[in-house]
Amino acid sequence: EAQVTQNPRYLITVTGKKLTVTCSQNMNHEYMSWYRQDPGLGLRQIYYSMNVEVTDKGDVPEGYKVSRKEKRNFPLILESPSPNQTSLYFCASMPYAGSSGRPPSSYNSPLHFGNGTRLTVT
Amino acid sequence: KQEVTQIPAALSVPEGENLVLNCSFTDSAIYNLQWFRQDPGKGLTSLLLIQSSQREQTSGRLNASLDKSSGRSTLYIAASQPGDSATYLCVLILTGGGNKLTFGTGTQLKVEL
């Protein structure tokens, strides 16, 4: 089954304690991305990756790091979490559209989301 | 910059009604449009995908249409059920290189018994 798997689903931690949220996809997608969702603000992009070893900042990257050493994995790292990072986090993946903006012909269900990680930082 | 607005922001209907959710966008240079539902505190489940060359897609009681010239997509839900209660999001995948995504503002639907 095609899926994006995030772990953990729930995480409660304290300020300053480093944590990693894992994201893995089994669809051989080039593009992966992290979002946070907060009430009234919708989904905001944190970081994204077009392919292995290629990452870039989204709209709200402060306080986060990512890495893309393998195609299937895209972990989100909070080096020193703070209470304002309490949020619901989503990982997503899709095939890469390429510089021409034209996705491959097998572009049938491009965007897949993980089930989310509810993070609370106290 | 592409802006995506979903109207209404919230909707409450009695069970059995047919309803229409709207997604309006300002830039017609989109490649795909995908509708998702999200249950409170849960993940996003893909409902329907419309490619830019298509006009509509159907799945069960759901029908989504796309009119790029007017900058609008609609999600039609027939014979609504309490289990349809969720937030519905439209997501635009844009042309112009890379994988640019723009999320709609969402419609929170409640179907009452």
Image (cartoon, coloured by chain):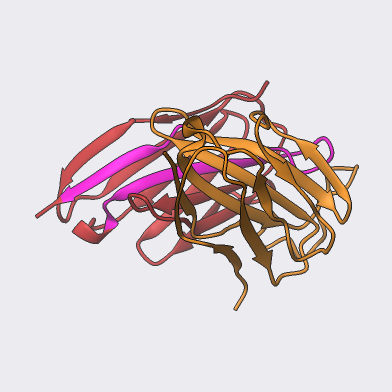
Chain colours: A orange, B red
Rendered location of residue B62, percent (x, y) = 39, 58
Residue A76 lies, in percent from the top left, at 66, 49
Q: Nearer the viewer, residue B21 or B68?
A: B21
What is the residue that sits farthest to the top in this orientation? B1
Q: Which is more toward the observer, B9 or B33?
A: B9
* Residue B91 visible at all: yes
- Specify whether residue B81 is in view: no
- Residues rendered magenta in the picture: B84-111
Q: Identify the residue at image location x=81%, y=58%.
A: A30
User: In the visual, does A68 lie left or right of B87?
Assistant: right
Q: Is residue B91 magenta?
A: yes
The quadrant where residue A23 appears: bottom right
In the rendered image, residue B108 lying in the magenta stretch gets the answer yes
Compared with B96, A109 (above or below) is below
Image quadrant assignment for residue B109? top left
Name the spot of residue B85 as percent of width and height, x first: 26, 52
Q: Is residue A91 left or right of residue B109?
A: right
Quarter the N terminus of chain A occupies? bottom right
The overriding secondary structure of the stretch rendered in magenta is strand
Q: Residue at x 65, y 37 (%)?
A: A46
Q: Is residue A108 above or below residue B70?
A: below
The C terminus of chain A lies in quadrant: top left
Q: Nearer the viewer, residue A26 or B65?
A: A26
Instruction: Determine whether, in the image, residue B95 is placed left or right of residue B71.
Output: right
Extreme residue toward the left, this view: B113
Residue A107 rendering spot, x and y as whole percentages: 73, 60
